[in-house]
Image (cartoon, coloured by chain):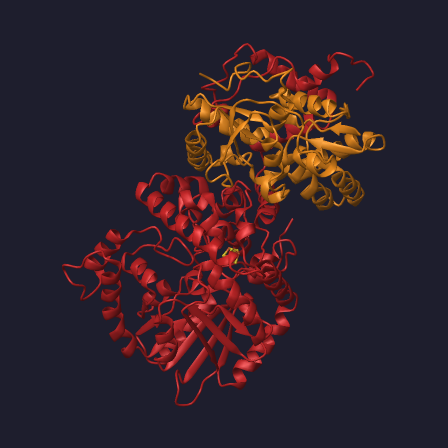
Amino acid sequence: MSTFLGMPTATGAVRGDRPFPAAAAAGLADDQLRRNLAHATGTIRTKRLAAVAELDDWEQLRLAGSALKADTMARLPQLLEQLEAAVAARGGVVHWARDGEEANRIVTDLVRAAGATEVVKVKSMATQEIGLNEHLEAEGIAALETDLAELIVQLAGDRPSHILVPAIHKNRAEIRDVFRESMPGAPADLGDDPRELAMAARAYLRRRFLEAGVAISGANFACADTGTLAVVESEGNGRMCLTLPRTLITVMGIEKVVPTFGDLEVFMQLLPRSSTAERMNPYTSLWTGVTPGDGPQEFHLVLLDNGRSRVLADPEGRSALHCIRCSACLNVCPVYERVGGHAYGSVYPGPIGAVLSPQLTGMTGGKDPNSTLPFASTLCGACFDACPVRIDIPTMLVKLRADAVEAAEADRTVPSGQDVAMAAAAWAMTDARRWSRLISGGRLLAWRRRGFRRLPWPGSVWTRSRDLPALPSRTFRQLWRRRPGAGEGR
Amino acid sequence: MRIALFTTCLADAVVPRVATATATLLTRLGHEVVVPPEQTCCGQMHLNTGYWRLGAQVVRHHVDAFEQVLEECDAVVAPSGSCVGSVRHQHAAAARRQGDSATAARAELLAARTFELSELLVDVLGVTDVGAWFPHRVTYHPTCHSLRMLRVGDKPLQLLRAVADIDLVELPQADVCCGFGGTFALKNEGTSAAMLADKVAAVTSTGAQVCAAGDSSCLMHIGGGLSRLQTGIGTRHLAEVLAATREAPLVLDAVGAGAR
Ligand code: SF4
């Protein structure tokens, strides 16, 4: 059982309020969402395969990425201290946050100290994870998302549904409506042409960039040897945030550190091809501490744990921390494609969310929504094949299912129906005679040569959308015993 | 060669014709088939549903049942990608989680000798033309565990292409999961059904008479969908297609595809 005493669990937006099957039902029933997602993921899937096929050494790159991450996790404390020293030596200030609440408090104090009531933001999973925007708002500080898709989601009062394309569940007509209604200064006759939409957002954002005194970002990578931070993005909004304001605050999960600057070579090849199917991403911003007279004059790095030490402590679950948030696993996942990101409750949806969220929070028993996430998969394995750092998500899902069942057993006094059925099946399956007797019972139903259309519960769960074949009048072991020439006892 | 048949619980209880076909095929190719009498199930359902303590008991039983014949047999074969996947990728780990390293070591030895049907035929026995005759239009669903856990690649297709008079048509989006996933089909019934709908549409688009696959469980799911929509398309296991000959043809109507 993987309970790590004393390890803090995550706070923030990493647990939904409903079990996965209930939340998935909403996505399944949303025709527009289904169409948007099928189109968007279908397109990116094809493009990714083409981008990856261009490189002869793609598999070696994946192995290198995986090895670099494994090495990083094996000596994470040491690398983080090295990073801290390197950042401080270049004039940055490093803060350590045990969980989301602590990180939110640190950031709020820093924004206040800078005298700002408004901040511009670069798209960041870490700040979403801890619910930073909501926290700042409650403290009277407005946080403006500047990534186009993130802005759409923010203006719509919606939640992101994809880690890279947060508004993947919206099409352009829906986006036009959001802009018309909620974006100050948007033209009343705004059309739904993508360029027109982008230009409207650009006009709106430009002034805010120039006025902002504080920017908040996440980080894709941080090099322990040089103290260099890296943000990878496509629109240039990140570059504006990272260079224009006087104060820059970066909130980064502790697993984002890499040992050396040179290691970026591997990840800068893996990430763009896996995420956007690009050979090279449009904007890669690298900065090291502060440079007098150039860019932000104050730089704060908030290192966020929020459950990560807990994940690190589990040798079988640890590689969930290797994730570079490319979103390839979401795009190839047949479950994600049909239910959408909101079904996963957490800000981390799809296959990686199904293994990461339950580990960050821990699973507390049968009623915990995060206990249902490891079961939100057919174990088809498409995610593992797509993952640029080779995280074996299917194996980890199965292991987390074992953890979930153990947590549920510890949580209840009376066994569930499933517990009883599984115990009975195991009882029969551990003795050939018991098993043989059980399955010969099938012949009682074998009169029905056409199979079954509708069965009473629990069989009804199967027959709601599929028929069940007719059962045979003889089991294989009976047939084999009576085959012509049998008799030697085999 | 003397080959132990790992029937799989589903074939034993629900589709015995698949196990029979496997035995018939191997016998026709000149091998002796042994059916270890103590076998029941590989424990995959328990393991994939999170019941590892119970699953490990089933795993131990499986190892006991096959170890008895391992001395006298050259290989173990199962007509199922996912059961062999469980033997190869889960059994030792399941025993180890319960602290049973002795069973884990025995499970590893057994796993090294256990093969999925197309692996056994192509890799171990070195045949692709098994002398089968199946004059029907067939489309093949590769199944996720064969494809991505065992990495059988195009071995099943090599075997099917060599079948006389077969009209093999490519299945669009073949590598996408059918939505079965064991207890997933019950726990997440709606999502499973949505995935099945797309698989059924892909199968129907081929104009095939039969959808074949190497796993009875996926076939039960796809077949259940094809039958529900009254498509008139049946499902057959790879073993059944390969076991069919001119002398002993597989009559398609003999077994109902499902409810009508
Ligand atoms: S788990 Fe792998 S594929 Fe999924 S987002 Fe992370 S790095 Fe990408």
Q: Quadrant of the C terminus of chain A?
A: top right
Going by the image, does B61 lie left or right of A318? Answer: right
Q: Nearer the viewer, residue A34 or A306?
A: A34
Q: Residue at x 18, y 64 (%)?
A: A186
The outermost residue toward the front is: B165
Colour red belongs to chain: A
Q: Quadrant of residue B162?
A: top right
The outermost residue toward the left is: A188
- Give the image location of residue B87, x and y in percent: 69, 38
* Vertical placement of residue B65 versus A297, above or below: above
Q: How many marks?
A: 0
Q: Nearer the viewer, residue B257 or A154?
A: B257
- Give the image location of residue A155, x and y in percent: 27, 60
Q: Residue at x 81, y 13 (%)?
A: A487
Q: Residue at x 62, y 21 (%)?
A: B244
- Give the image location of residue A136, x and y in percent: 35, 68
The outermost residue toward the bottom is: A293
Q: Is residue A341 visible?
A: no
Q: Quadrant of residue A18?
A: top left
* Vertical placement of residue B25 versus A271, above or below: above
Q: Nearer the viewer, residue A384 or B190?
A: A384
Going by the image, does A32 lie left or right of A424? Answer: left
Going by the image, does B94 lie left or right of A455? Answer: right
- Give the image location of residue A95, x and y in percent: 50, 75
Q: Residue at x 55, y 71 (%)?
A: A265
* Vertical placement of residue B76 versus A305, above or below: above
Q: Is residue A44 visible?
A: yes
Going by the image, does B17 lie left or right of A378? Answer: right
The outermost residue toward the right is: B71
Q: Colour of chain B?
A: orange
